[in-house]
Image: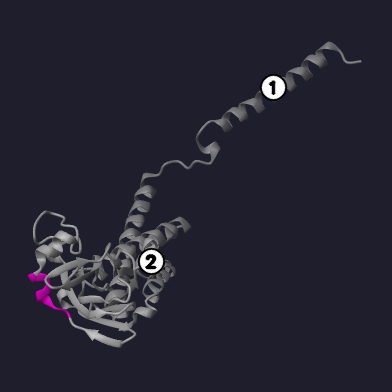
């Protein structure tokens, strides 16, 4: 049998153990070293901030140098067809960042770098390179895009001092012109369009060709036709500012260059393929762009009531 004193002593010991365990549990719930948080060390914090700052500027400098090498060394030696290397190679330079740090920064800094440092450096390099590439390949530092169609293209039938414009303007690649049965698209047929460029469209070479059943022919631009008939053209192609000089074909005004090309006289029924090739010596490549349009001359269906 257990006497009363022994039982009370055992209960007291058990209670003390429970209180000790509860105290430890409360200590774990408090912030501090029990949670694995290191004590703040100002000296170590300053050293880490200096190392991170040095890493940031080193990565920015590295990215700028890589961007300049891409633009002025690699790009002039690369064709447009193989231009993917211009982005893949600089971005692959991310793997050189840790080695560059070890070569150029003191060991006291490198000891503080972690995997998180290389992760942040990779993002910084990527976005710095993309920003620099955008600046270096666009005007005024570069030009890698040929002039483009300012808005739409239109066809004009000029006969006996009368002007007939095609129904709708060439927002797509095909225009349809209806003529009477057994008739031709009589008169002079003119192609009108405007070109826009981010530098100067005057320096581009424009080659216009026509292909139909009669064969292939190269066409010349006529600068006088647009100037002589500016008011008629503006009134029939969407005058955008109520002036004789404005036209939706040239939405940027004097920044666009107008083109008027006589594609033929008395065109027969059928398809007439128009090709416009734009060549420009850009920086550093020769820029090119090709448009292919179709004029489809069709006969009107006979009137059912006439039969």
State the predominant SS element of the stretch in magenta. helix
> Image quadrant of residue 9?
top right
> Image point 19% across, 61% down: which residue?
237
Q: Secondary structure at mark 1?
A: helix
Front tag of 1 and 2: 2
Quadrant containing the C terminus is: bottom left
Q: Residue furthest right?
A: 1
Place of residue 62 in the rendered image (x, y in percent of width and height, measured from the top left)? 32, 68
The image quarter containing residue 303 is bottom left
Mark 1 Cα-neighbour bin, 10 Å: few <14, some 14–19, many ≥20: few
Q: Nearer the viewer, residue 221 or 42?
A: 221
Residue 35 spot, x, y in % from top left? 54, 38
Q: What mark, if any, has residue 264 been given in the picture?
A: none
Q: Residue at x 50, y 35 (%)?
A: 32
Q: Is residue 58 left or right of residue 282?
A: right
In primary-sequence order, the first of circles 1 and 2 is: 1
Can you say which quadrant of the picture contains the N terminus? top right
Residue 71 shows in the view:
yes
Residue 101 got which mark? 2
Task: Give the percent coordinates (x, y) of residue 43.
Answer: 36, 48
Which residue has dot 1 on it?
A: 16
Gap between marks 1 and 2, in whole Å? 57 Å
* Residue nearest the viewer, comparing 84 with 299: 299
Instruction: Check if residue 168 falls in the magenta segment.
Output: no
At 24% from the left edge and 86% from the top edge, which residue is drawn?
Answer: 218
Magenta residues span 221-228
Do the CB atoms of the residues marked 1 and 2 lie less than 8 Å apart?
no
Is residue 113 something one can see in this rendering?
A: no
Q: Nearer the viewer, residue 102 or 284?
A: 284
Q: Position of residue 93 (x, y in %)?
A: 40, 71
- For the residue labelled by badge 2, is the local secondary structure a helix, a strand or a loop? helix
Tell me, yes or no, whether the highlighted magenta stretch contains residue 225.
yes
């Amino acid at each position: 049998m257990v006497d009363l004193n022994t039982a009370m002593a055992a209960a007291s010991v058990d209670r003390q153990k429970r209180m000790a365990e509860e105290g430890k549990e409360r200590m774990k719930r408090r912030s501090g070293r029990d949670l694995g948080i290191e004590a703040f060390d100002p000296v170590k914090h300053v050293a880490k901030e200096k190392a991170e700052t040095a890493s940031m500027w080193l990565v920015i400098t590295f990215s700028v140098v890589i961007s300049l090498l891409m633009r002025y060394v690699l790009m002039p030696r690369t064709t447009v067809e193989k231009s993917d290397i211009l982005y893949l190679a600089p971005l692959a330079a991310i793997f050189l960042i840790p080695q560059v740090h070890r070569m150029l920064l003191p060991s006291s800094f490198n000891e503080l770098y972690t995997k998180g440092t290389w992760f942040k450096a990779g993002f910084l390099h990527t976005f710095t390179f993309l920003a620099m590439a955008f600046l270096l390949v666009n005007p005024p530092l570069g030009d890698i895009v040929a002039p483009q169609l300012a808005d739409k293209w239109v066809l004009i039938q000029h006969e006996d001092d009368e002007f007939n414009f095609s129904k709708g303007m060439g927002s797509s690649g095909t225009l349809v012109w209806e003529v009477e049965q057994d008739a031709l698209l009589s008169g002079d047929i003119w192609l009108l369009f405007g070109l826009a460029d981010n530098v100067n469209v005057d320096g581009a070479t424009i080659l216009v060709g026509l292909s139909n059943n009669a064969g292939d022919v190269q066409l010349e631009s006529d600068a006088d036709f647009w100037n002589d008939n500016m008011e008629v053209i503006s009134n029939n192609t969407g005058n955008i500012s109520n002036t004789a000089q404005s036209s939706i074909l040239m939405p940027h005004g004097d920044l666009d260059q107008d083109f008027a090309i006589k594609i033929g006289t008395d065109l027969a029924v059928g398809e007439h393929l128009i090709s416009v090739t734009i060549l420009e010596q850009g920086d550093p490549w020769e820029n090119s762009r090709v448009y292919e349009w179709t004029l489809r001359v069709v006969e009107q269906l006979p009137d059912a009531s006439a039969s």
